[in-house]
Image (cartoon, helix red, strand yellow):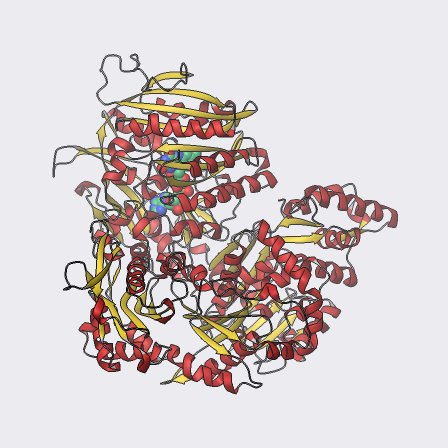
Amino acid sequence: MATLDALKLTLRQSSLSATENETQPLTDAQYGSSFETLMQSSEWTTYQNFIAPQLSHLLLSRSRISILEIGPGPKSVLEYLPEHVKRRIKRYVAFEPNEEFGTKLEERLISGKQLADLRDPPTVHKTRFTLESGDADTGSSSQKFDIILFCHSMYGMNPKRKFIEKALEMLVDSPAQGLVVVFHRDGCLNLDGLVCHRTASFPAATVSVLDDNETLDRFTLFITGHTMKDAVTDELTRAKWRETCRALGSRKNEHSQRLEFSTPTIMAVFTRNATALSKLKATVPRLVEKETVKSREARVHQPAAIFKPTDIAQVQECVQWALKHDTGLTVIGGGHSGHCLWSGVVAVDMDAFDQINIVTDTSETQSSLLIAGSGCKTEQIIRKSMEAGKTVPLGSRPSVGAGICLQGGIGHLSRIHGLTCDAIVGAVVISVASGDIMCVGKVPEKYQPAGAVRPENEVDLLWVINGAGTNFGIVVSFIFKTYPAPIYSVHNWVVPLKSDRGAEYTIREFNTAIASKLPRKYSADAYLFWDEGQLQLGVNTFEIIPNPSRSSPLTALATPFLPASVTYGEPKHAKMVDGIGLFETEMYMSEMHGGHTGGKTSSFKRCIFLNDVGSEKISKLLVEAVQKRPTPFCYLHLLHGGGAIADVAPEATAFGCRDWDFACVVTGVWPREQDGEKSARDAIQWVYSVVRDLLPLSNGIYGADLGPDPRDAAFAIKAFGPNRSRLARIKESSDPNNVLAYACPLKNSIRDPRLILLITGEHGVGKDYCASAWKSFVSGYTHRERSFVASVVSISDAIKREYASRTAADTDTLLSNKREDRDYKEQHRASLTDYYQEQMKQRPKLPEESFLGAVHSAAGVDVLFITGMRDEAPLATFSHLVPESRVLEIRITASESTQLLRRGVKGDYSEYSIDDKTSRPDLKFANEMYGSTLAHNFAERCLAPLLHEGIEQLGSMVPSIPDFPRPGIEFRHVLDIAQRPEGLTLCTSLLRAHFTGDWNQVGAIACCEAGGFIFASALAVQVKVHLLLIRESGKLPPPTVSTARSPSYVSLSAGGKATKYSIEMNVEKIPRRKPVVLVDDVLATGKTLCAALQLLLKAGVNLEDISVLNVAEFPLHQGRKLLRDEGFGRVNVRSLLVFGGV
Ligand SMILES: Cc1cc2nc3c(=O)[nH]c(=O)nc-3n(C[C@H](O)[C@H](O)[C@H](O)COP(=O)(O)OP(=O)(O)OC[C@H]3O[C@@H](n4cnc5c(N)ncnc54)[C@H](O)[C@@H]3O)c2cc1C
């Protein structure tokens, strides 16, 4: 998909023949209509998933906010904020030069009460914001603002830096520093050395414009910003512009009436420190060119400045400067990642730290240690170590730098010696919390810099450097253990693949007959690529010869390791090489597509870990991926794993993904001269979608190169195996100011609501009405001086907005809940449903996208009501996506006559009816009466207990214990509740209150050992119901009933056996035809619960009669999904607490 930037360039080029004298700027009317066209074409998702949450996040830390908005158009971007955030805005001033827009804006704000809590009426200046704008214009004694907002790409403001500087002068200093916030559509915002406080990006943003002449004319006017003076030339130019749009725009499918352009949007936030670079410039050398940065993707960014410190004090200077000015830094090693440069951020290039020394390790085995500065590149380290007959396990490219050491490091020695990070025994690091120099692990005395300290969390720091080290400090030097330098016997073959089925078979054969059979001193890589008109499999084998003969090490050639059954024929190449020669033997460098060398191509990679690549599902996906490549040179590289990589336990180092046979590097390649163009964007998008498709079948993701691009966030969750929560914790203490904000994302900075209530029910039952009544209840509810912010979001709003922007429908009326708008909504109902179905076909993840969009649009609220859901079993489907939030479903019902009365029309609503067979809501509300009394009573009875402070208090009684039962696991000690003086009493009363049935009717409280016994016993005493113990087989006297059970997550984590065993209970204790409440301490994978439920069923208890109460739930394990899959979706399951960890 072409970007708006590319379109702009091409449109301008196509009117280049015109001199400036022949063009004229847009009139107000032209500007107005073209601006509206652009706004209608802009995807609502950009507002919902990016602008609103980012702005909310900034505004939520402040109260009584004054805002100056520059050039809002007819509608303020603030209207997209959740209500509770809007309420913080007390003063609003805008500059809107378009008279008509200014008037509309005033109307929306004043009559439409869009910002209802303003202290004074809004001030809209119908004039341009200029460098001279000031007191007189902003119209009050205080012209300072908390937030100054440029929301439409600073259209027409040049030079942009001057306008931002002007805005910076108008910021308040207290109570919190004022912020200038710029949302910029398309390309990079080059601000000429201004330093950003924070930035964020949304690469997935698009505009989608109707393909008719009139709309395209308005659209192109906005993009180019001019018309031609001469009417005939103008007409001809417009025709040319339309054709350009049609040539560059993409269509979702061949029938689509809309042209789409990509508009990667960024947010840049500035404080008054934006201009504070001069001090650093005076003390640390600066680079003018991005010369050491290899990544073409990174080069697109416009950093505030690149500094190249030459000694440790200068690195400290950079860190201290960042801390003082509350801003971030990026670090450049070999410059291969896409985020070592970031727009508006200062980069620290470690290139000058290029010393390498080899010393004898006197402390242990007299082996050699290699000390390398973090500016060293792979080839330098290999060369220098080879001089001493040694080597360090590194990767395949000579120019790759410190990033490979810090993030893992996979190479041809990995199967015999492990990853690069496994060879790191120590490091010298500059703390980004204090600027101190720290030595961690083994650092020979001579290489300990003056003033270096041993940090308190030294063990943690060495642990993170072993596999996830880009987030915690700036590494100055690494200390590696070394191995004897081997030579390598390398062979390669290219096997043409005649058909897709044949290709899948050949991959399977490669995996089973070759790769899986190889001893550790061999490795076999495979490449899947398209060349010479067909799919090809490249096979590259490497044999490590550890002790080459000193006389002529490279002359003898080992025989390739291939079983007789494999018929690849003669190898295409066979070579004996040393560690340097090895760099040239990679097939993608020499064999594929004539070789990817010589600066002809650019590439983008993400790497995913796979086992059993020959399985039907994986091999099919791999073949499909290459078939769908958007450019001819895209390919897959399977790097051989196993061996020594898996010898290290996942939690022993931060590199937590160790159990994989292949690291599949998905590489998008395009001609270098097309950097930043459509083919580059398509190739990058292809990489993301191939990895996303493989994700469910994977054993993790390689953390290398995951960065601030939001598309990486989902991958980062799978990057560190069981170590993610420990990493997030260490990040918090080692980098409290988030100086290294642009490295691999370890945690989400925007908090999700604590309680999410999914309001479901058939059409016309009054879901929106009830949600709004309950929102008012929650907003007005206080418990011991604690109040709550609540919000209602309809999950279908986003799709309605999209639909409206693609048709002539009116967004506001479609979204309205007013009675008078019902007819209008009814008219659009069928085509809206068609539109939704169509989108579902094209975007299978649309429900998840919509759910997360709704949640993120309510950043910072305590309680979120989500309406408009049509999904079956929404809890089982979505709750794991928001593992920190407690999610409940409230089903609203109403009799048919009430529904008809409310809708006021007759019709067929069958598609809205909810199938109740596989799931059951947590709460039900029969909405049969007019007025809100019933809803209010329901809220008192059922919602108030959810807000009870006791829940928070109970949560605070569950300590998190790091590294238990194994290193790397953050254990939530739920049973500790019972060890606290008031814990058991509080927990019991909450369990009692959260049961929605009648305790007097309950026949028994069932419980599993051991945690369940404790909580169930205390509860049983309180509610006077007898206990039903579920125990491991053989521990209860007969007669019993039993069933098989898998071990729990915790016992597996503690190293317990994965074998199944049986559980049982006494038959005599089972009540006849009476409800049973099953009480347990924890719901994680759901296996224990499923077994217990099976047991109850086997004992004759009716499924409808069973309810479950858990003290805590860990939604990431998707226990609810398992319950539903196993047929227990209709069991009512309640948990008092939820925890996001694993
Ligand atoms: C052509 C190519 C081939 C590759 N081959 C392999 C391979 O064979 N095996 C493999 O495992 N990986 C391979 N990779 C992936 C590679 O490991 C990553 O791209 C790695 O991040 C590159 O490190 P760098 O220092 O060159 O890049 P940079 O972009 O400079 O750094 C990468 C990350 O490390 C951080 N960083 C750099 N220096 C420091 C420091 N001193 N202190 C703190 N943080 C720092 C940066 O801020 C950035 O987040 C390859 C990549 C490419 C492009």
Q: Is residue 81 left or right of residue 411?
A: right
Establish if 589 lies above or below 795. Answer: above
Of residues 661 and 70, the one nearer the viewer is: 661
Q: Is residue 369 depicted above or below 968 in this figure?
A: above
Residue 494 left/right relative to 1040: right
- Measuring from the top left, give residue 1113's x and y in whole percent: 33, 65
Find residue 1017 and report its horizontal and vertical position in percent. Answer: 21, 74
Q: Quadrant of the N terminus?
A: top right
Taking 110 as reference, is 879 above or below it? above
Q: Where ligand 1 lies, by quadrant?
A: top left
Observer able to see residue 308:
no
From this view, report whether residue 652 is shown above or below residue 972. Answer: above
Residue visible at 29% across and 15% down?
Answer: 558
In the rendering, at what x and y percent does residue 820 appear? 70, 77
Q: Please indicate, yes or no, whether residue 491 appears anywhere in the rendered image.
A: yes
Give the residue at x 57% y 24%.
Answer: 533
Q: Residue at x 76, y 46 (%)?
A: 242
As rendered, which of 201 and 303 lies closer to the eye? 201
Which residue is located at x 68 percent, y 60 percent?
831
Closer-to-camera residue (594/997): 997
Count of numbered tags: 0
Q: Work out which quarter of the rendered image holds the C terminus and state it.
A: bottom left
